[in-house]
Image: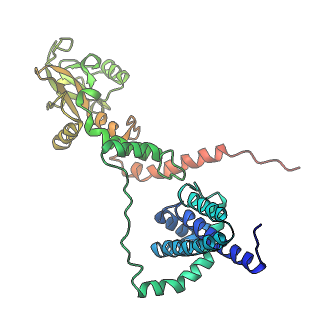
């Protein structure tokens, strides 16, 4: 039978509490990175994080103190336990190793975080006296261990962006994660992957008269720029493109001229096998918004607009009904109009107030 006197029992409890406290605090400090803990502490909305950050700010020093304290207290427990029963010492070692290696607290809602919040003021006070001693002996300048990110190539980074949206505590909007993902995969795509093929184009003849019928026809297509072909080649297998007609140039036009008199006569080409990086560079260099896409046999196979390219980065169709960028008053009041619309939406979604009798 095991024999414990009162003093030894108290000693066991004190030593066990020291080991327990060291393990729990070490685990609690691994729940959140120091950067995130600091961010939460500075926000002023998370008092628990603020309390723990005062302790975590000692970084490697607090970790070294916890390990030394835990190892010394654990060694004494093993020595004392072995004097009474070898299996008790083995059991303590097994449980301690499991707690150190296998136990993984997942978030800040468990008892581990609550315990750390409760004891962190005392540990912070103790570290304020221990830290100067460690500094005097140069023990706070230990080489920092850099944890590998696990990212070796682009596919690893893409997988990381996918997982980030599902990660607990993520505060990066899904739209921004998607944009970052699209930016990384942007260079893998070619012009042929996103162009509007020739069979879907609405090509206008340069000799066609500008009038209500033409404007109504162009509006229904949903496009804002149209390739202009010479004479009767609009229906040909290979139309002869001589310019570009912009729908905005027809707004307010009251004349009776032809498309040829309103079109932009510059025509730029891009190869269907070129990467989107090259296409974007061509748009920026020429300041033109519509390119004719050709193949290696100099045949027209479609068109590419700058919106087609930018949509691959943004991740959604670029639709902006606001086009009065030359109106100072309209531009100045644009954000105020958005704020008002958002306020009205929030107000309409609120539950109606209860009537009082």
Q: Give the residue displayed 59% in from the left and 63% down from the top.
A: 93
Residue 47, position as x, y percentages in the image: 62, 69
Residue 261, position as x, y percentages in the image: 17, 27
Q: From this viewpoint, which residue is outermost toward the right?
A: 357
Q: Tell me if residue 332 comes above or below residue 43 in the rendering.
A: above
- Residue situated in front as seen by the camera: 337 or 125: 125
The quarter of the displayed image where residue 188 is located: top left
Q: Give the residue displayed 63% in from the left and 65% down from the top.
A: 89
Q: Give the residue displayed 33% in from the left and 41% down from the top.
A: 155
- Is residue 324 in sight in this rendering? no
Q: Quadrant of the N terminus?
A: bottom right
- Residue situated in front as seen by the camera: 246 or 87: 87
| Coloration mode | rainbow
Q: Tell me if residue 173 comes above or below residue 297 in the rendering.
A: below
- Tell whether 196 sits left or right of 261: right
Residue 27, position as x, y percentages in the image: 56, 63
- Residue situated in front as seen by the camera: 222 or 337: 222
Count of number-bearing discs: 0
Q: Tell me if residue 225 comes above or below residue 6 in the rendering.
A: above
The quarter of the displayed image where residue 142 is located: bottom left
The quarter of the displayed image where residue 294 is located: top left
Residue 157, position as x, y percentages in the image: 36, 46
- Tell whether 280 sits left or right of 5: left
- Residue situated in front as seen by the camera: 245 or 258: 245
- Is residue 155 in sight in this rendering? yes
Q: Give the residue displayed 78% in from the left and 78% down from the top.
A: 6
Q: From this viewpoint, which residue is outermost toward the left?
A: 297
């Amino acid at each position: 039978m095991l024999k414990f006197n009162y003093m030894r029992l108290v000693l066991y409890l004190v030593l066990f509490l020291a080991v327990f406290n060291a393990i729990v605090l070490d685990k609690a400090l691994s729940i959140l990175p120091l950067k995130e803990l600091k961010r939460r502490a500075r926000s002023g909305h998370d008092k628990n994080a603020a309390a723990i950050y005062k302790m975590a700010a000692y970084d490697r020093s607090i970790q070294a103190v916890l390990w030394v304290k835990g190892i010394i207290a654990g060694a004494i427990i093993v020595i004392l336990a072995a004097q009474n029963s070898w299996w008790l010492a083995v059991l303590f070692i097994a449980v301690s190793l499991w707690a150190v290696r296998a136990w993984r607290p997942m978030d800040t809602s468990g008892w581990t975080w609550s315990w750390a919040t409760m004891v962190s003021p005392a540990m912070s006070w103790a570290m304020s006296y221990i830290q100067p001693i460690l500094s005097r002996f140069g023990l706070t300048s230990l080489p920092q261990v850099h944890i590998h990110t696990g990212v070796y190539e682009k596919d690893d980074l893409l997988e990381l962006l996918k997982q980030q949206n599902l990660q607990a505590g993520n505060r990066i909007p899904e739209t921004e994660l998607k944009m970052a993902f699209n930016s990384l995969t942007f260079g893998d795509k070619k012009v042929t992957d996103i162009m509007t093929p020739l069979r879907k184009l609405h090509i206008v003849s340069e000799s066609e008269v500008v009038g209500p019928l033409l404007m109504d026809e162009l509006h229904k297509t949903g496009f804002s720029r149209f390739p202009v072909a010479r004479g009767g080649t609009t229906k040909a297998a290979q139309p002869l493109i001589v310019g570009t007609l912009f729908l905005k140039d027809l707004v307010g036009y009251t004349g009776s001229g032809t498309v040829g008199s309103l079109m932009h006569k510059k025509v730029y080409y891009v190869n269907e096998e070129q990467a989107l990086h090259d296409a974007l560079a061509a748009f920026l260099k020429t300041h033109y918004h519509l390119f004719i896409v050709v193949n290696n046999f100099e045949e027209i196979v479609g068109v590419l607009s700058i919106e087609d390219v930018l949509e691959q980065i943004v991740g959604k169709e670029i639709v902006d009904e606001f086009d009065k960028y030359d109106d100072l008053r309209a531009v100045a009041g644009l954000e105020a109009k958005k704020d008002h619309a958002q306020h009205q939406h929030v107000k309409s979604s609120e539950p109606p107030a209860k009537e009082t009798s």
